[in-house]
Image (cartoon, grey):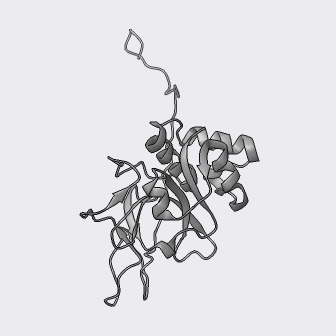
């Protein structure tokens, strides 16, 4: 608008955009499975292999005051998101997802948010960013103050796995883990974990 009251044709001064994504999850329960937007539960009276974590007396964690939530992952970045969480818990948030994403691209020429992380790259990439030791059992690692980065099967998607971080265990042996797809702690039976990698993290590099 000019001082004399006239106005120009509309002009584009700036523009911005924001992307959104919708992701469906399938329950890993025994007997039937099915769409599970919130998670947990059982089917046909059977105990679910995984469910939302329920605090109870006797639960053991790798440290006091484990953070129970995290930012939900973006697209295929489950490993990078869980690396941010582990970095935060072990080292006071040494690096975030963007740092790990750029590091992965520089190392392998792949953008993880588009294509995920190649299974062959997982262990060497983790070793590039975290101090570790040979894995000696989930409970043993937790008892010695270490987090375990590992993976689980994605129900309904054959051949696809999902990175999580084990932070504790319950008296009944169920493991307590952070799921970056849901942003909260879950618990599950030990046989769910370690599909093709297990990494005991004890510090950041």
Q: Position of residue 99 (x, y in %)?
A: 59, 38
Residue at x 52%, y 39% (from the top left corner): 96
Q: Quadrant of the C terminus?
A: top right
Q: Position of residue 154 (x, y in %)?
A: 53, 71
Residue at x 60%, y 44% (from the top left corner): 131
State the image quarter where residue 61 is shown: bottom left
Is residue 194 shown above or below 34? above
Residue at x 57%, y 74% (from the top left corner): 157
Is residue 94 among the parts visible in the rendering?
yes
Is residue 179 among the parts visible in the rendering?
no
Residue at x 27%, y 62% (from the top left corner): 55
Q: Position of residue 118 (x, y in %)?
A: 70, 58
Q: Which one is in front, 88 or 15? A: 88
Q: Which one is in front, 138 or 159? A: 138
Tell me: 127 left or right of 152. right
Tell me: 160 left or right of 137. right
Q: Which one is in front, 194 or 85? A: 194
State the image quarter where residue 119 is shown: bottom right
């Amino acid at each position: 608008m000019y001082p004399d009251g006239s106005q120009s044709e509309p002009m584009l001064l700036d523009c911005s955009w924001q992307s959104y994504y919708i992701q469906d999850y399938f329950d890993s329960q025994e007997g039937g499975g099915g769409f599970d937007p919130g998670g947990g539960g059982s089917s046909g009276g059977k105990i679910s292999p995984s469910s939302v974590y329920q605090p109870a007396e006797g639960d053991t964690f790798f440290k006091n005051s484990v953070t129970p939530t995290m930012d939900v992952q973006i697209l295929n970045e489950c490993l990078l998101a869980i690396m941010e969480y582990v970095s935060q818990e072990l080292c006071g948030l040494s690096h975030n997802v963007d740092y790990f994403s750029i590091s992965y691209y520089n190392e392998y020429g792949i953008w993880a948010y588009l294509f995920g992380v190649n299974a062959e790259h997982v262990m060497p990439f983790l070793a590039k960013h975290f101090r570790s030791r040979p894995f000696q059992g989930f409970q043993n690692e937790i008892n010695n103050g270490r987090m375990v980065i590992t993976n689980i099967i994605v129900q309904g998607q054959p051949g696809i796995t999902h990175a999580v971080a084990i932070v504790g265990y319950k008296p009944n042996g169920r493991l307590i883990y952070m799921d970056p797809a849901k942003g909260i702690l879950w618990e599950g039976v030990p046989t769910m974990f370690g599909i093709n990698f297990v990494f005991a993290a004890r510090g950041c590099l």
